Image (cartoon, rainbow, N blue to C red):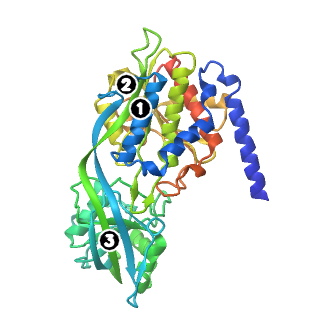
């Protein structure tokens, strides 16, 4: 009953917040009333639908979504601002994973087929192979003997599959740090150099608490080994692989972390791997860019950029990662704010670029392409507003406040007059797609919902997990903040 009462109270609070956002504060924000949760959810349902297959950057599903949303920009009356109409072209790394199977061979000679999704997933740029092999545990999968640490010392990984922790070691060896060597692809390369046939990562002790297998195309620098599979397994599955040793993952991790000494060993277990992926080093993809020209001849050369990444992590085998919150929610909000600006009955003084970015998931490639080849001079961009994972949770997080305090304060004041859902906690720099902008000295503000990652990169990131009232309130706050900036109410930092 207590949980029911809390749920009712939260629902009433969010309803009241939405009503406040549409009340007196709406005056002076043309088009604000057009931003409605039903419309936002309809866009998310399209973007997260099975037909788009998880919107992996460069995939047929992604390109369909990009064409559809470019068409919506056109119908709103936005001007194309890409290098080919609304599209800004870029090439991305890409893999289609057609088959992904894993089976644990039991001591009695039988095989236990593991379930794709809950038990394991492939890394997004995995290599392909079919084999059966014994297993070895190799700590964090790091080998830097010249710096005093080597998870491969004292074990023979030749012809075996390596099980290793996904998280980087929590202890520093020296001032240099671990660098890119702790990314999955470099660790796979190290395993292959030691003769291994594949790499299994397990997220025990992940600093973000994401212990479930998650889809990811963030693999680290190449070269790509198309014959070397990289996968991720759930913690109970990894523990089952350790069963013959009588040891627990947590104990092994604690021993490594406390002594800074490897605890590597044979596992007396075998695994059957069947992965078939089609890899392309360069796959065409696009950013989608629409321009609303400002109304003031003295200010229209100054530009506000509002962006969200459109891509997610795709599909593999018979599962799809829908990416409803990450980041169909942000893309839908950019569309809604663009429509409110374009059809709200007035144009702001400054110009506004609405941007849907590719390849955030693989390393911010779309945002880097944008700032590297901007449709307007970077010195003309007054601010960048980033929307990422904005529709799950109970409140609003505004990032970049430590480095763009005036912009952050503007949004906080608008929220205080309306929904009153933002929290004071913030951070410096950019974060995700805002990072390349911040690195170029452009003020940024990062909109996200708090407690937003329960289904991150999992098949369960579906529209049904979103909070429509919070979604609407946050999108309206983006609109209000953007309108103030575009009207000249933000002088910069």
Q: Residues within 10 Å of mark 1 (few under 14, many from 20)?
A: many
Q: Where residue 433 sits: x, y (%)?
A: 40, 39
Q: Residues within 10 Å of mark 2 (few under 14, many from 20)?
A: many
Identify the residue at horizontal 21%, vertical 65% (top origin). 146
Nearer to us in this view, 377 or 109: 109
Identify the residue at horizontal 43%, vertical 31% (top origin). 71
C-beta proximity under 8 Å, tags 3 and 1: no
* Secondary structure of residue under mark 3: strand
Q: Residue furthest front?
A: 51
Identify the residue at horizontal 50%, vertical 27% (top origin). 338
Q: Does 302 appear above or below 330?
A: above
Residue 70's disc number: 1
Report the residue marked by disc 3: 274
Q: Residues within 10 Å of mark 3 (few under 14, many from 20)?
A: some
* Secondary structure of residue under mark 2: strand
Report the Cα–Cα distance between label 3 and label 1. Answer: 39 Å
Nearer to us in this view, 233 or 148: 233
Q: How many marks?
A: 3
Report the Cα–Cα distance between label 3 and label 2. Answer: 45 Å
Report the Cα–Cα distance between label 2 and label 1. Answer: 9 Å
Q: Does 96 appear above or below 480?
A: below
Q: Where residue 30 sits: x, y (%)?
A: 59, 20
C-beta proximity under 8 Å, tags 2 and 1: yes
Report the residue marked by disc 2: 80
Nearer to us in this view, 418 or 493: 418
Quadrant of residue 238 in the image? bottom left
Who comes first in sequence, dot 2 or dot 1?
1
Does any portion of residue 31 appear in the rendered image?
A: yes
* Secondary structure of residue under mark 1: helix
In which quadrant is the N terminus drawn? Answer: bottom right
Q: Where residue 386 sits: x, y (%)?
A: 46, 36
């Amino acid at each position: 009953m207590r949980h029911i009462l809390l749920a009712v109270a939260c629902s009433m609070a969010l309803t009241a917040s939405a009503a406040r956002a549409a009340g007196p504060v709406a005056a002076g924000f043309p088009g604000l009333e057009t931003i409605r949760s039903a419309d936002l959810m309809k866009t998310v349902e399209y973007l997260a639908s099975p037909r788009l297959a998880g919107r992996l950057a460069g995939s047929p599903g992604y390109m369909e979504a990009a064409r559809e949303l470019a068409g919506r920009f056109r119908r709103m009356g936005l001007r194309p601002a890409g290098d080919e109409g609304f599209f800004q072209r870029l090439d991305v790394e890409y893999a289609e994973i057609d088959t992904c199977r894993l089976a644990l061979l039991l001591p009695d000679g039988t095989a236990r087929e593991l379930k794709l999704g809950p038990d394991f997933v492939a890394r997004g740029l995995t290599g392909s192979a079919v084999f059966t092999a014994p297993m070895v545990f190799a700590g964090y999968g790091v080998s830097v003997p010249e710096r005093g640490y080597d998870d491969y010392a004292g074990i023979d990984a030749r012809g075996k599959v390596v099980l290793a922790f996904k998280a980087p070691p929590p202890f520093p060896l020296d001032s240099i740090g671990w660098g890119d060597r702790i990314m999955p692809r470099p660790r796979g390369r190290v395993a292959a150099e030691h003769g291994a046939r594949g790499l299994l990562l397990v997220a025990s002790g992940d600093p973000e608490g994401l212990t479930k297998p998650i889809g990811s195309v963030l693999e680290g620098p190449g070269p790509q080994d198309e014959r070397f599979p990289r996968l991720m397994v759930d913690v109970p599955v990894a523990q089952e692989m350790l069963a013959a040793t009588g040891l627990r993952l947590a104990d092994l991790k604690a021993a490594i972390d406390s002594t800074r000494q490897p605890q590597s060993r044979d596992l007396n277990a075998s695994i059957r791997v069947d992965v078939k992926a089609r890899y392309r080093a360069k796959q065409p993809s696009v950013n989608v860019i629409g321009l609303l020209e400002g109304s003031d001849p003295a200010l229209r050369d100054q530009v506000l950029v509002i962006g969200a990444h459109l891509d997610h992590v795709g599909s593999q085998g018979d599962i799809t990662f829908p990416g409803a919150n990450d980041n169909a929610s942000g893309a839908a909000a950019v569309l809604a704010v663009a429509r409110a600006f374009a059809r709200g009955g007035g144009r702001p003084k400054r110009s506004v670029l609405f941007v849907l970015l590719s390849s955030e998931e693989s390393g911010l490639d779309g945002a880097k392409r944008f700032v590297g080849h901007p449709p307007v001079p970077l010195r003309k961009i007054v601010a960048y507003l980033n929307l990422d994972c904005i529709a799950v949770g109970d409140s609003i997080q505004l990032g970049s406040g430590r480095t763009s305090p005036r912009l952050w304060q503007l949004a906080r004041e608008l929220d205080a007059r309306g929904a009153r859902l933002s929290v004071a906690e913030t951070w410096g720099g950019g974060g995700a797609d805002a990072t390349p902008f911040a690195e170029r000295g452009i003020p940024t503000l990062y909109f996200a919902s708090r407690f937003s990652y329960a289904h991150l990169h999992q098949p369960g990131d579906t529209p049904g997990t979103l909070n429509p009232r919070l979604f609407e309130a946050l999108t309206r706050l983006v609109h209000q903040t953007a309108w103030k900036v575009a009207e000249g109410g933000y002088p910069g930092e």
